[in-house]
Amino acid sequence: MKLYEYEAKTIIATYEVPIPDGELATTEAQAREVAAKLAVPLAVKAQVLVSGRGKAGGILFVISSKVAGEAAGKLLGS
């Protein structure tokens, strides 16, 4: 079975396993809103069904909500 990270986190949370806070964003604006709610620094991650997404540039670490929006735009555009 293949699951995106956000789908797996939802399933795991139903069993009361602690998971890091996070939300799915599909636009730069949504990414900025989510980042404003969460504590920075944080990771902006591409939700793709491939291995090695970190090495391929699919995980970006950011220090502000503005930069989170820019990082999301970069990932959404690739």
Image (spheres, grey):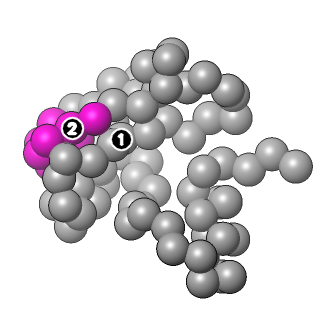
Q: Contact (CB < 8 A) between labels 2 and 1?
A: yes
Is 42 colored magenta in this rendering? no
Is 67 colored magenta in this rendering? yes
* Residue found at the very far right of the displayed protein: 1
- In the picture provided, is 63 more to the left or to the right than 42? left
* Residue 13 image offset from top left, x and y in percent: 60, 76
Q: Is residue 44 above or below residue 7?
A: above
3D distance between C-alphas at marks 2 and 1: 7 Å
Query: Residue 2, located in which quarter of the rendered image?
Result: top right
- In the picture provided, is 16 more to the left or to the right than 75? right
* Residue 18 image offset from top left, x and y in percent: 51, 74
Q: Amino acid at mark 2?
A: Val
Mark 1: few/some/many CA within 10 Å (<14, 14-19, 20+): many
Q: Is residue 73 above or below residue 28?
A: above
The residue at which mark 1 appears reads as 44
Q: At 40% from the left edge and 52% from the top edge, which residue is drawn?
A: 25
- In the picture provided, is 66 more to the left or to the right than 35? left
